[in-house]
Amino acid sequence: MKKLFKPMDKLFEGVTFFCVLAMILVVLLQVFSRFALPKAPSWTEELSRILFITSVAFAAPIGMKKGEFVRVDTITSLLPRTLKKILELIVDIAVFAFIMMVAYHAIDFIKLGTIQRSPSLGVPMSLPFSAMFIAPFFIGVYGLKRVFDLVIDFKKKS
């Protein structure tokens, strides 16, 4: 399974790095042009917003993989280890089900974007809207991997 996830990890990390770097450069261009040029290019604001959304969409699955999403563990830290693992499994299954439902409904959002174009760049809005599918779908994939890992770990300890 590592052979499948390692290239995905590299892709998500690479796209996230590229988008953040490009966003920094675009924002620097925008700031420079506001002070040094008579008129700032209008496309920089739109592109920086699209790059930010894309970077979040590609970074979120890595956050799920590493378990870095916000969680409140006040109650679970008081539970016995076995009960804590069972609760984690139930929560991960619920998150998987919810996030896949979000991904499924995001497809309609992408379809809506096919008839719209961004004002400054002129790209089909289905491209930036696809982040609404990419993030939840791959969060779900990594969430399902966490579920399998928890089940395997639970069986080993039993």
Image (cartoon, rainbow, N blue to C red):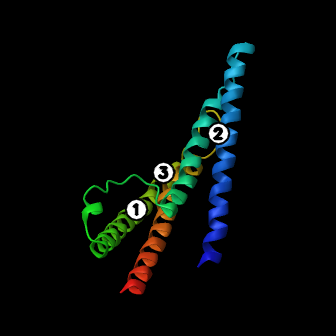
Labels 3 & 1 near each other (Cβ < 8 A): no
Query: Picture coordinates of residue 158 (x, y %)?
Result: 35, 87
Amino acid type of the residue that numbered disc 1 sits on in the rendered structure: Ile
Q: Is residue 140 visible?
A: yes
Which residue carries the number 2 mark? Answer: 122
Q: Position of residue 126 (x, y in %)?
A: 56, 51
Point out residue 81 in the picture as x, y percentages from the top left corner: 31, 72
Mark 3: secondary structure: helix
Q: CA distance from mark 3 to mark 2?
A: 16 Å
Please name the amino acid that badge 3 sits on: Leu
Query: What residue is shown with label 3?
Result: 112
In the rendered image, the vertical position of residue 33 relative to residue 76, given as above or below: above
Q: Which mark is residue 99?
A: 1
Q: Nearer the viewer, mark 2 or mark 1?
A: 1
Along the line of sight, the residue nearer the viewer: 28 or 37:
28
Q: Quadrant of residue 122?
A: top right
Which residue appears at 43% of the width and 54% of the height? 69
